[in-house]
Image (cartoon, grey):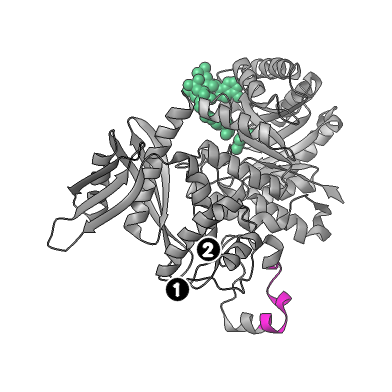
């Protein structure tokens, strides 16, 4: 059976999703979870893109031991140098360098001829080979490139030192049959192709990213690229959890498998969804809330008689658990700790007491605490530990149909000073945000506000995502609480605190 390598680009192409902005702590948390999931390669970012991206790639490369870490670079020496500086102390420094090859990109974007693109690609691979032991080279927009030219440039970059050749369907244009034929063509027309691994990188603009990636596997690709939950630029990338489960369930057909710990899929998916604010659709394959739910009588009857009538993936395979121990306000510390351990939510002993206090406060107001509630509480505590400059102590909001909404807020500031302000607004949230703007020391411009529920039922937790500019710096924030207004205030302060935190750590 062939072993297919999984190249995860959640932190690079995934973060290119419109509206997604992850901070360093969040990226490291994701990388650690990807290591548990056992992807082979983590593309941690684009080191030349910004100081923040550089530092996160460096931090991830220096921390992750059981996966190879890579960073993206244009065919430009300064990008390659930045990638080297970020990756050089990792276990297996690996560069991902790309240049567009299609006529559209050559003519309009790069303004380079075929020969000039080849010359630059070769020069940059040779340059990179002086530093990096492993070089992945990507032909951006490969699928709209003339095949003879694609074969020619690939042969030349292999001669120059590339070890992995990636064939991206950058704009999600190709069909499975055509994509498979490209791989076959390259096998037959690139003399040195046997020296390298071939990788597939598909986008989902026409909804064919999974089918295309699997067609590549059928035609000789030994690496597939994608993101968790399929997030990514425009319509997103191939969803890695779907690829891995498809290969696993249909081993009989593909005769291939990955090293992924499939049980970690559910946890990884919900972590990415929470940190990016990108909600997983209920009907999404493998990780959607309804993916294992049977609604109609005939299906339920079949499943009761024999699960395999309607269930080809067992939820346990991908880490969905059936919770037998119901946690609520009467639960004690042991049951709480036990459930955290069962869920694989690693928590230091000294943090349990604080988490248990938060748990009790919420459980007092909710009927039942779900696994999602617990995961959300632990995550919030982990991520906001370093970043609490302004902390919410109390809010009071008055709203009536014939009244002007008014909010009063009490915060503690960086030096534990108490700040209290009141303000009006045209609605409750606006009154609250106007008041918070008076409390924090700076100008705030709200760009986006979204709310979703975590867990099920009328007493589900509220999770709010905001995007705002604080003192000219764009950032995002997340807040969780039983109450919508409290979650909104938490999200706002989380965003403001992040700007202050980033300014403090980058001085
Ligand atoms: C298909 C993909 O996903 S590609 C990866 C996309 N990711 C990103 O863009 C990461 C975020 N990007 C950034 O932060 C910025 O775009 C940077 C730092 C990379 C570059 O910023 P700037 O120098 O201001 O350039 P800008 O983004 O406006 O334009 C891109 C330039 O790179 C050139 N370029 C694009 N791809 C490549 C490449 N693979 N190799 C060499 N040059 C390239 C473009 O032709 C353009 O050059 P020009 O200025 O001579 O016209
Ligand atoms: C940089 C490359 C691999 C990419 O993301 C694409 O072409 O879609
Ligand atoms: Mg891409």
Mark in the foreground, 1 or 2: 1
On residue 351, which mark appears? none
**110 versus 491 height, above or below:** above
**41 versus 240 height, above or below:** above
Instruction: Please give the range of residues in magenta.
Output: 302-314
Apparent side of residue 321 relative to residue 205 in the rendered image (left or right): right
Dot 1 lies on which element?
loop
Q: Looking at this view, is 258 or 74 the one in front?
A: 258
Identify the mark nearer the N-term, 1 or 2: 2
On residue 282, which mark appears? 2
Q: Work out which residue is located at the far left of the displayed protein and give it.
A: 402
Ligand 3 lies under 8 Å from the Cβ of mark 2: no
Q: Residue at x 67, y 61 (%)?
A: 319
Quadrant housing residue 269 = bottom right
Q: Distance of mark 1 from mark 2, alpha carbons?
A: 23 Å
Q: Residue at x 70, y 68 (%)?
A: 314
Q: Looking at this view, is 309 or 344 the one in front?
A: 344
Check whether the beta carbons of the residues at disc 1 and disc 2 lie within 8 A of each other: no
Give the percent coordinates (x, y) of residue 262: 71, 56
Q: Residue at x 70, y 48 (%)?
A: 36
On residue 367, which mark appears? 1
Q: Residues within 10 Å of mark 2 (few under 14, many from 20)?
A: few
Give the percent coordinates (x, y) of residue 174: 64, 43
Q: Looking at this view, is 255 or 11 the one in front?
A: 11
Q: Residue at x 79, y 45 (%)?
A: 219
Q: Quadrant of ligand 2?
A: top right
Quadrant housing residue 191 = top right
């Amino acid at each position: 059976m062939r072993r297919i390598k999984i190249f995860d680009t959640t932190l690079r192409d995934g973060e290119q999703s419109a509206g997604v902005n992850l901070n360093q702590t969040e990226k490291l948390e994701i990388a650690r979870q990807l290591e548990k999931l056992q992807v082979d390669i983590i593309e941690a970012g684009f080191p030349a893109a910004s100081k923040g991206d550089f530092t996160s790639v460096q931090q991830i490369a220096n921390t992750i031991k059981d996966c190879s870490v890579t960073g993206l670079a244009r065919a430009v020496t300064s990008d390659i140098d930045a990638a080297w500086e970020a990756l050089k102390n990792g276990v297996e420094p690996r560069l991902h360098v790309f240049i567009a090859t299609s006529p559209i990109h050559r003519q309009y974007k790069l303004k380079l001829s075929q020969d000039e693109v080849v010359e630059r690609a070769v020069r940059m691979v040779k340059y990179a080979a002086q530093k990096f032991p492993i070089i992945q080279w990507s032909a951006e927009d490969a699928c709209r490139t003339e095949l003879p030219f694609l074969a020619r440039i690939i042969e030349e970059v292999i001669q120059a030192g590339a070890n992995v050749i990636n064939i991206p369907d950058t704009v999600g244009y190709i069909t499975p049959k055509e994509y498979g034929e490209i791989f076959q063509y390259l096998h037959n027309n690139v003399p040195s192709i046997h020296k390298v691994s071939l990788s597939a990188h598909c986008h989902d603009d026409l909804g064919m990213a999974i089918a295309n990636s699997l067609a590549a596997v059928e035609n000789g690709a030994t690496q597939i690229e994608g993101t968790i939950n399929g997030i990514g630029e425009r319509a997103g990338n191939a969803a890695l959890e779907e690829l891995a489960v498809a290969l696993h369930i249909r081993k009989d057909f593909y005769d291939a498998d990955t090293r992924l710990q499939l049980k970690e899929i559910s946890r990884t998916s919900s972590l990415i969804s929470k940190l990016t604010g990108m909600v997983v659709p209920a009907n999404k394959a493998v990780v959607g809330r309804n993916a294992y739910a049977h609604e109609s009588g005939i299906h339920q009857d079949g499943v009761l008689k024999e699960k395999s009538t309607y269930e080809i993936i067992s939820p346990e395979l991908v880490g969905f658990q059936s919770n037998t121990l119901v946690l609520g306000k009467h639960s004690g510390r042991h049951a709480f700790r036990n459930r955290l351990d069962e869920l694989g939510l690693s928590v230091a002993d000294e943090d349990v007491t604080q988490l248990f206090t938060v748990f009790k406060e919420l459980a007092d107001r909710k009927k039942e605490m779900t696994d999602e509630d617990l995961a959300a509480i632990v995550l919030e505590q982990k991520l906001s530990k370093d970043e609490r400059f302004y902390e919410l102590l109390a809010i009071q909001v008055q709203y009536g149909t014939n009244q002007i909404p008014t909010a009063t807020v009490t915060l503690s500031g960086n030096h534990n000073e108490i700040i209290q302000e009141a303000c009006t607004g045209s609605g409750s949230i606006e009154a609250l945000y106007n008041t918070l703007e008076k409390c924090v020391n700076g100008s705030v411009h709200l760009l986006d506000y979204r709310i979703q529920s975590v867990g099920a039922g009328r007493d589900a937790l509220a999770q709010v995502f905001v995007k705002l500019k604080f003192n000219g710096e764009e950032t995002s924030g997340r807040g969780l609480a039983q109450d919508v207004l409290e979650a909104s205030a938490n999200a706002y302060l989380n965003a403001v605190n992040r700007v202050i935190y980033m300014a403090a750590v980058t001085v």
